[in-house]
Image (tube, rainbow, N blue to C red):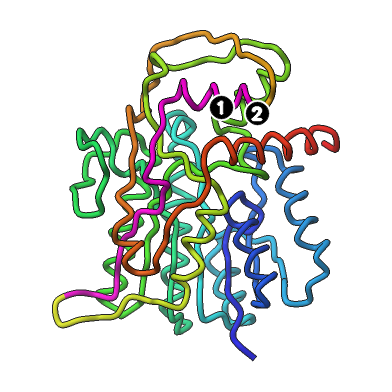
Amino acid sequence: MPAPILITGSAGFIGFHLTKRLLEAGESVIGVDNLNAYYDQNLKQARLDALDALKNPKFHFKKLDLTDATALTAHFTKTHPKIVIHLAAQAGVRHSIDNPAAYADSNLMGFFHILEACRHHDISHLIYASSSAVYGGSKETTFSEKQPTDTPISFYAATKKANEVMAHSYAHLYGLPCTGLRFFTVYGPWGRPDMAYWRFCARIMQKKPIPVYGTGDSQRDFTYIDDIIDGIIPLIKIPPKRTAHAAPNRILNIGNNHPIALKTFITALEDAIGIKAEKHFLAMQAGDMPHTKADITALHNLTGFKPKWHINQGLDEFVKWYRHWQGNA
């Protein structure tokens, strides 16, 4: 029997979708999550309930905080995973400005404990979540993995950059194969309530004004959740290899490669909902990036990755799900 895949953050947005897809493909999955209260815990529990509804004996979940090194090590020893996909983190750029300690605990110490557990349990591939936020205030029009990322403009971004550096050191010192994924503005059903598209949707449906920071011309490389999962899964069985000149470590962008202006995004959301939004324009917020666009050449060359979802299709799916969620929440 193949060894199970351990997914941290399995009750989170991306973790839930990845777990579901892997179970549907017949894989065994061990889910780990601390179910913290950063956003609605009922949503996290509903994701777990949806996974449980699959009645799949190949899925096992454990509530576990990654800052508890002893419990994490014991869980690795008990379950014997060979592949780890680390998606758990304290999320949110703006929240990190007011609550940096939470990010130090979860994103730095939690990730350190994951690295240590992987090192001591012969993990064949660690895939972990980084973020497009590491590009900071870059003036480049397209973000490539080759450009410098040493000027983060939020503490959240700083923790993700630190994760990349930590992973490289473990790959170099201990031969742990590591793949870091820089996600670009992921959206879709079962998403996070703190994300702009969710908050906009809620306020438009309530016929309340939406806050638009800046002029609406800022651009984001919005990436639908199914495209993200399509990008992750082929990588699982392609760990980086050590060479004479490099550690078994790599960083990959995973995005749509087709950014759109915030005002265009809002129009697509209005169309999906069927209601026009009242917009209140405000100054840009600290930590916000003016534009993001992923160069996905490296991921495409490695796996053939090519995003399929257009923003209108993706927002239609989100709005349909959101209406169902609101009817059952």
Which residue is located at x 36 percent, y 29 percent?
287
Q: Residue furthest left?
A: 245
User: Residue 217, how many percent across, how many down?
Assistant: 37, 20
* Rendered image: mark on residue 22: none
What's the distance in space between the residues labelled 1 and 2, CA to CA? 6 Å
Mark 2: amino acid: Ala
Residue nearer the viewer, 120 or 240: 240
| Position of residue 327 in the picture relative to residue 196 (left or right) | right
Residue nearer the viewer, 100 or 324: 324
* Rendered image: mark on residue 268: 1
Q: Magenta segment: does it hold 279?
A: no
Q: Residue 2 lies in what quarter of the image?
A: bottom right
Task: Please state, as top left, top right, bottom left or bottom right, where the C terminus lies in the image.
Answer: top right
Q: Residue 79 lies in what quarter of the image?
A: bottom right
| Position of residue 322 in the picture relative to residue 178 (left or right) | right
Q: Is residue 188 above or below residue 6?
A: above
| Neighbours of disc 1 within 10 Å: few (<14), some (14-19), many (20+) | some
Which residue is located at x 57 percent, y 77 percent?
76
Q: Is residue 211 above or below residue 299?
A: above
User: Residue 312, how many percent across, how many down?
Assistant: 57, 35
What range is drawn magenta here?
A: 246-272
Residue nearer the viewer, 264 or 195: 264
| Position of residue 187 in the picture relative to residue 168 (left or right) | right
> Helix or strand or loop: what does disc 1 sit on?
helix
Which residue corresponds to mark 2? 272
Q: Residue 111 lies in what quarter of the image?
A: bottom left
Task: Please state, as top left, top right, bottom left or bottom right, where the N terminus lies in the image.
Answer: bottom right
